[in-house]
Amino acid sequence: MQKMMTIISNVLRGSASRNAASAVVLSRSYADFTPEATFDIKKVDIYRLEEGPPLTSTLTREDGLKYYRTMQTIRRMELKADQLYKQKIIRGFCHLYDGQEACAVGIEGGITLSDHLITAYRAHGYTLTRGGTVREIMAELTGRRGGIAKGKGGSMHMYTKNFYGGNGIVGAQVPLGAGVALACKYLGTDQLCVSLYGDGAANQGQIFETYNMASLWKLPIIFICENNQYGMGTSVERAAASTDYYMRGHYIPGLRVDGMDVLCVREATKFAADHCRSGKGPILMELQTYRYHGHSMSDPGVSYRTREEIQEVRSKSDPISMLKDRMLSNNMASVEELKEIDIAVRKEIEDAAQFATTDPEPPLDDLCSHIYANEKPFEVRGATPWTKLTSHS
Amino acid sequence: MLVPLRPPTDSTNHYTFGLIGDDVIVPLFLCRSLTTAMAAVARLLFRVTGSKASTAHVNSGAPGVLGTSLLSLSPKCSSKLQTQKKHASHFTYHPDPVPTMYGPTTKMNLFQSVTSALDNTLGSDPTAVIFGEDVAFGGVFRCTVGLRDKYGKDRIFNTPLCEQGIVGFGIGAAAAGATAIAEIQFADYIYPAFDQIVNEAAKYRYRSGNLFDCGNLTIRAPWGCVGHGSLYHSQSPEAFFAHCPGIKIVIPRGPVQCKGLLLSCIEDHNPCIFFEPKILYRAAVEQVPTEAYTIPLSQAEVLQEGSDVTLIAWGTQVHVLKEVVNMAQEKLGVSCELIDLQTILPWDTETVCKSVAKTGRLLISHEAPVTGGFAAEISSTVQEECFLNLEAPIARVCGCQEVDQLLISIYSAPRSNLSEDFTANRSYYFPSHCPYLEK
C-alpha cells in the first residue's frame, strides 16, 4: 500500500528514479529554465603539466539536478547513519562523508560506470555514485542480509560492480588500484582506475611503491588524494613534511583541485581521464575538501579543530549550497523544485532506514560462507572440537 | 550442520549418569554463558579411561547408561539471536588481590597502569622516547595522557601514518642506544611492520654476532576482541610472531600485571612486543603500585591450584576461565588449575608441564583462530613432554577455524554463547574406533 502511494505520488510529481533528472511538472514550464550555463571555476594548480583543466565548466540543467540530488542523498544518508549509530542500530565503525560530497559526485561526472574505482573506508558516498542503492547501503550499515555485502562487511566494506570498496587498512587499497589499472591496460579496454586515499595515508610507504610501478608501466590510473586537512586527529602540517600532496608523486604530473566545487572536480577528473586514456600514464589529483563530522563516530571532531572552523567551511564552501546557488542564480531550477528533490530524498532515506532496521540479519549459515572459492561445502571447526559449522561458497 | 544459539534461560537441565567404575555423579547443564569452555572441561572429565570393561560398555554406544541419559535429555534449542548477541561477549573482570610487596598502591585501570609504567620509565631513563600515531595528545586509548606535558615534546612525539616506518625507525633508535617505545595503534595494523620486526629486529643481534642489537625496543599495541571491533580492530596476532625467534611477546591480564610486565619488557635487553587487551583498558580496575616494579618474563603464573584439569589462557580470556573454574567447582565438582601464560614467547614450558603432569588434562583457550594459534604450540609441546601423564586429548577452545574477526566478536569467540547438542557431540569422545581406548 505504502509503495503504491509512493509510486502514484511520484508519477504525479513527475519525478522518476533517483538518478534521473526530474522532468518537472510544476507551476513553471520547461521554457522558463535555462537549459545550460557556463561557470567560472577556480584555477587548478598544476605540476609537471603544460596546461591544466579549463577555467570554465558548462553545466546542463539535467546534470545540475542530478548532481544536486546525488549530493543531497549522500548528505542525508550520512546524517541518517549518524542518527542510527547514536541509537545503536548501527554498530562497529562508521566513517561519514558529509562535506565531501562534491568529490564523489564530481569524480563520477568525469568518468563512466565502466571505469573502475577503489577507495578507503570513507566509502558510503562512492558506493552510491558507483551504482549502489541507499537501501542496500543502509542495510549493510546495520548488518542485515539486504545489505550490499550481504551484511558481512559493514560500513568499511561495501562493493559494487567496478567499485572495489571500501578498505579498512590505510593505504592498502592504492596498490590494488594499480593492479586493476594494469588489468585495464592488459585487456585493451579503454577503462581506467581511480585510486583514492587520504592525506593521512599519503605517508604510507606502499603508496610510493605504487607511484613507481604505475609510472614505470604507464598504467591508466588516476591517483586521487582526498585532502580533508586531518588524518583522524592529526592536521596535515603535523603529519607531512610536504603538504603539497599533488606534487608528491614526484615524477607523476599533478593537479590540486578545489574539492568543494563539484564542477571543478568534474573538469579536473575529465582532464585526468583524458590524460590516462591517451596512454600518458598515471596522474595525481589532490582534492582539497573538508569533512564536517569527526574521523569516525567515536570522534566528536572538535578536539583538534574548532567549531568555528567547521562552521566557516559550512557557510562559505558547502558543496550543495554552492551548486544550489549557482543553479538558482542562473535560473536553472526553482526553489520549489529543489525543495521537492529534498523531500523526495528525505523520503528515500526514511524508507531505506526503515528497511535497514527491519530486514533480518544474515542467517547463521552464512557465518563461515565464502572463505574459499567455489568448492563443496566443508566443515569448519568452531570454538571447540565438536562444534562444527559449514562453509558454503 | 549448524547449531542454533541457545536462549539465556536460567532453567538447568540436570543430567545424571554414572561412569562405570567411577562413582562420580555429575549434573550437566547449559548455562547462558561460558557454555563452550565449561562443556569442554566437562568432556575432559568424562573421558573414559581405566578398565576395558568400562570402555567396552561405552563403546557399544546408545544402550549404555551414558548413552540413554544423554539421548533422552537432548535439549530443544530455539535460537533467539537478538538476546544472544548482547551476551555473546560477556565476561566478568576478576581483579587481582592488592599487591603488598611493591610499595603504596592507588586505584588504576589498565590504560592508567600503562601511563604509570611509561611515566616511571621516562622519569628514570633519560634516553627513553615514546612515539607512535597520536601518542602526543594522549593516544587513542589514553595510554600516554600527560606525559608530553611532563617530559617534553622531544621525548613523546607523533609519527605519521606509517607502521613500517615506525618500527624501522624504532629499531634504529634502539640500536643507537635510546630506549625506544613504539606504539602501533591497533595490533591489526602491525602487519606492515612485520618485515621489520621479524627480519630486522629479531635477527639483529644474531647476525651481527652480538655487536649490535635493538634490545632497547619495545612495541606496544592494543590487542584482542572488543565486541564491535570487526575485522580490523579485534585481532590477536601473537601466533604470527611466536614463530620468530629473537623477540619476546608478552600479554598481561590486568593492570598490576600490565605495569610490571611492561616495565620488564622495557628493561629487557631484547626487542619485545607488548599486547594490551583493549577491552580491559577501562574495564579492568585494580590497586596498582605507584613505584616501578617488574614481574619476571617467561614465567607463567598459577592463579588457582587444582587437581583435575589444567586450564591455560592469556589476556582477557584468563577472566573467562576464572569464571569457568568457579562454575566447574560448583556445578561439576571439578577442581581446575588455572594458569596465566603471560609471556607467549619464550613461554614457560616448565610450569605448564608440571601442572599437566599433576592433573593429566589440559585445556587451552584463546581468541585467535584455532588453526596455527598458539594453543597448537602448547599442545604439541605438552604432548611431547607429558604424553604418558595425559588422560585425555588436549582441548583447545579458540576462535573459529578460518573465520574472520567480524564474526568472532559476535559468534565465535570462545566466550560466546555457542550451544552444543550433546547427543551429536558425544561421538567426538566416544568414537567407535578410538585408539585411546584400545590398550
Image: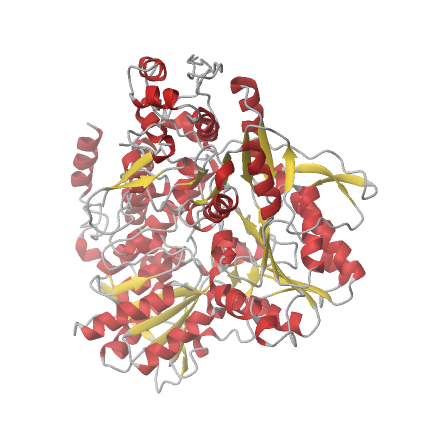
Residue B315: % across, % down: 57, 43
Q: Residue at 56% x, 69% y: name it.
A: B203
Does residue A285 appear left or right of residue B99 in this picture?
left
**In the depicted view, which residue is nearer to us: B264 or B233?**
B264
Residue A146: % across, % down: 27, 39
* Colouring scheme applied when the structure was drawn: secondary structure
Residue A243: % across, % down: 52, 73
Residue A92: % across, % down: 45, 43
Q: Residue at 16% x, 74% y: name it.
A: A188
Q: Is residue B34 above or below residue A296?
A: above
Which quadrant of the rendered structure holds the N terminus of chain A? top left
Q: Residue at 54% x, 49% y: name it.
A: B223
Q: Is residue A328 above or below residue A179?
A: above
The number of callouts visible is: 0
Q: Is residue A53 above or below residue A5?
A: below
Q: Is residue B424 above or below residue A295?
A: above
Q: Can the viewer see residue A333?
A: no
Q: Can the viewer see residue B322?
A: yes
**In the depicted view, which residue is nearer to us: A245 or A373?**
A373
**In the depicted view, which residue is nearer to us: B92 or A338?**
B92
**In the depicted view, which residue is nearer to us: B127 or A292?**
B127
Q: Quadrant of residue A167?
A: bottom left
Farthest bottom residue in view: A50
Does residue B89 appear left or right of residue A303 in this picture?
left
